[in-house]
């Protein structure tokens, strides 16, 4: 069976655009083949800065023929009672190009419908691809697209050529004046000439001959091998940086690794500064000595090659020298002012027009941090100091040049200023976690300051309708709420969400538009969505989480404990039958309204099962409440389970909806008490009885 290849040749596409685009291309081609009943052996998405390539092996040359069944109107509408066709029946047959005699009848869950059954011939795969590919290319997602020249086509970068082959035949189509063909081009500098491609295997061989390594995984392996070979004589290793490695892979079409040196005097700069200067501006890898210290050496990955490479190395060294000299200047300038003195400069930094300056934000963080330190029993002095200094490095020269060093430089400068180690660490840790899989703060101080910072941002943004929409989240509110949840659960902090939000709201008085009630409702639901997703990622069922947060979502750590206990309890073989018993209670109470203070009259309990249920429920009530207050949720659930037999007997032998209104209301009151008792733990009506 033939192979398929598509190559979109472009100007250099930014490295960060490529992996998501290639993943999308692969997924959508697989979907196209699946939707058109076309099998394939493999689908690969490959790419370099100048080309996006799809290869699918072993696709049938045409679709198989298939039987098609088309439903029409109901039989009763298509034929009269005497069997003659109606206007509806005649119209359906005419629309489908068949005679009335060709109409059949099909039994469906909604009744009998007329239908036609016909054999549909499969289409040629090349024809299907010719229609599919132009729309497919235009819909490849990029963070930003552009137009060029006088054309209307939008793409990440200008398209220069399109290669599209099925087997050895060109799939013909046009895209804004660009004709598909069988030509590709080699490396821009080392082999820029065009060459014709016969098929997929010829394409791969020809690219190699024209100094293009189209497979990103091969380029990554080649880079790692090149680094190892270059450093082996020195006995050094490189500082592993997966994110940088992935970026460099998509910056080159054929990697050439070179090693450069810089003046050892620059090693007096903080390690983080050196690494960041090499990484962010130049995409260089740092090199490590056997003792773990930085060496005055770096690794660069070139996209071109020249005999000897000395010119390249000198060029890299010259550029890096300028960067390190700048970093040295920034560091020395920063050291002329203490971190404490920098806080005043935050008055000139606007956090948000509606929320004031970063200086105002720092003082809100201080108040929120002190509030949490009182609740959590963390010494306030260090918390206050860390909160006061936590944003001071934002106005430093170094962070102005390298924004990714925020917090890191704060920690360095705080140490040089003689601040306590716990304050220094907290300044750095309050930014943790920076992304979903990042590490969490080790210390309580950094955790408290970081949570206070995020809560101030959340409440301020929600209070001014600056909320995420779709994929747009400019203030990182989703990340902030998830970070708070992760910290709370990791450290088992018991904090009232409602009181915490109220405190943050009070501190923002005059800067928010929503009422406190509406603001809390929005913030709580935002947290609940993140909380659901976080626990579902652990493999906990949605309905388990929903059952708990429907009745208890103020203390996030406590809610998580309940969810996890309920999740474990669901593995008990008796759980399903227990839920069925409880749902009988819920179902019979649905639509019933009883006063909150309604109480069971023991004298009206005429039947033995209702007297037993009343007695057993009363017997466990106080103990259950005690267990709940002690947060012994496993024991509380096990205690609830002891009511199952008496609840079942009650329903089997007692007529709850007795004609006598007094007896009926008394029995409903008894069941309401059972439901309210259960609901102290969770809303079990939301839990599916099935596992």
Image (cartoon, helix red, strand yellow):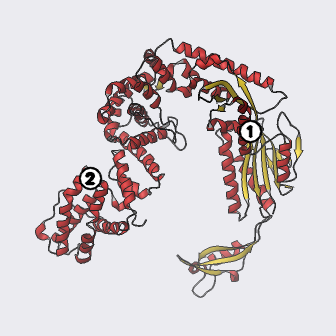
Label 2 sits on a secondary structure element that is helix
* Outermost residue, top side: 336
Q: Nearer the viewer, residue 416 or 22?
A: 416
| Residue annotated with mark 2 | 628
Position of residue 651 in the picture relative to residue 88 (left or right): left
Question: Picture coordinates of residue 104 (x, y %)?
Answer: 65, 81
How many marks do you count on the picture? 2
Position of residue 593 in the picture relative to residue 274 (left or right): left
Q: Nearer the viewer, residue 107 or 284?
A: 284
Residue shown at 70% from the left, 38% from the top: 224
Residue shown at 72% from the left, 44% from the top: 216
Marker disc for residue 609:
none
Structural crowding at the residue carrying mark 2, measured as other residues with C-alpha within 10 Å and reported as few (<14), some (14–19) or many (≥20):
some
Position of residue 539 in the picture relative to residue 492 (left or right): right
| Residue annotated with mark 1 | 49
Where the N terminus falls, by quadrant?
Answer: bottom right
Question: Picture coordinates of residue 229 (x, y %)?
Answer: 74, 35
């Amino acid at each position: 069976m033939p192979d398929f290849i598509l190559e979109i040749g472009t100007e250099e596409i930014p490295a960060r655009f490529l992996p998501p685009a290639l993943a999308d291309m692969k997924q959508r081609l697989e979907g196209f083949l699946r939707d058109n009943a076309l099998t394939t052996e493999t689908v690969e998405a490959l790419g370099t800065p100048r080309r996006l390539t799809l290869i699918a092996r072993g696709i049938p040359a045409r679709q198989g023929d298939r039987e098609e069944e088309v439903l029409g109107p109901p039989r009763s509408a298509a034929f009269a009672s005497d069997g003659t066709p109606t206007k509806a029946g005649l119209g359906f047959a005419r629309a489908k190009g068949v005679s009335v005699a060709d109409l059949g009848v099909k039994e469906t869950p909604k009744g009998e419908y007329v239908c036609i059954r016909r054999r549909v011939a499969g289409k040629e795969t090349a024809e299907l691809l010719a229609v599919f590919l132009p729309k497919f290319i235009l819909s490849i997602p990029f963070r930003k697209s552009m137009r060029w020249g006088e054309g209307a086509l939008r793409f990440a970068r200008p398209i220069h050529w399109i290669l599209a082959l099925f087997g050895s035949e060109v799939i013909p189509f046009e895209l804004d004046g660009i004709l598909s063909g069988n030509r590709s081009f080699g490396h821009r500098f080392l082999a820029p000439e065009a060459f014709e491609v016969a098929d997929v295997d010829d394409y791969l061989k020809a690219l190699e001959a024209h100094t293009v390594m189209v497979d990103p995984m091969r380029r990554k392996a080649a880079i790692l091998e090149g680094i190892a070979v270059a450093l082996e004589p020195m006995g050094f290793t490189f500082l592993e940086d997966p994110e940088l490695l992935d970026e460099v892979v998509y910056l080159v079409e054929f990697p050439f690794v070179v090693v450069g040196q810089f003046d050892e005097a620059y090693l007096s700069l903080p390690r983080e500064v050196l690494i960041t200067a090499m990484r962010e501006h130049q995409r260089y890898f740092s090199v490590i000595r056997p003792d773990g210290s930085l060496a005055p050496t770096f690794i660069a990955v070139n996209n071109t090659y020249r005999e000897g490479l000395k010119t390249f190395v000198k060029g890299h060294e010259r550029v890096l020298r300028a960067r390190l000299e700048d970093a040295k200047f920034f560091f020395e300038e920063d050291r002329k002012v203490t971190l404490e003195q920098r806080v005043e400069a935050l008055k000139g930094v606007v956090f948000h027009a509606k929320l004031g300056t970063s200086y105002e934000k720092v003082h809100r963080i201080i108040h929120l941090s002190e509030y949490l330190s009182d609740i959590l029993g963390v010494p306030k002095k260090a918390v206050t100091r860390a909160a006061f200094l936590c944003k001071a490095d934002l106005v430093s020269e170094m962070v102005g040049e390298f924004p990714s060093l925020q917090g890191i430089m704060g920690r360095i400068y705080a140490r040089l200023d003689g601040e306590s180690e716990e304050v220094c660490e907290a300044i750095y840790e309050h930014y943790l976690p920076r992304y979903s899989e990042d590490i969490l703060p080790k210390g309580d101080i950094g955790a408290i300051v970081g949570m206070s910072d995020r809560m101030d941002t959340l409440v301020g943004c929600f209070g001014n309708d600056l909320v995420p929409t779709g994929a747009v989240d400019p203030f990182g509110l989703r990340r902030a709420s998830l970070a708070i949840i992760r910290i709370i659960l990791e450290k088992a902090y018991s904090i009232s969400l409602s009181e915490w939000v109220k405190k943050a709201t009070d501190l923002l008085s005059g800067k928010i538009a929503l009422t406190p009630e509406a603001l809390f409702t929005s913030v709580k639901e935002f947290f609940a969505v993140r909380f659901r997703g976080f626990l579902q990622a652990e493999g906990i069922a949605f309905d388990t989480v929903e059952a708990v947060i429907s009745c208890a979502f103020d203390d996030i750590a406590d809610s998580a404990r309940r969810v996890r206990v309920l999740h474990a309890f669901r593995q008990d073989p008796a759980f399903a039958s227990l839920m069925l018993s409880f749902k009988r209670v819920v179902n019979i109470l649905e639509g019933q309204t009883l006063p909150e203070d309604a109480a069971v009259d023991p004298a009206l309990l005429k039947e033995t099962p209702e007297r037993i249920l009343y007695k057993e429920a009363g017997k466990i009530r106080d103990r259950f409440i005690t267990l709940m207050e002690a947060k012994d949720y496993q024991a509380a659930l096990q205690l609830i389970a002891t009511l199952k037999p008496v609840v079942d007997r009650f329903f089997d032998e007692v007529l709850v909806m007795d004609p006598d209104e007094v007896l009926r209301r008394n029995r409903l009151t008894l069941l309401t008490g059972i439901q309210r008792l259960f609901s102290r733990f969770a809303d079990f009506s939301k839990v599916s009885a099935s596992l």
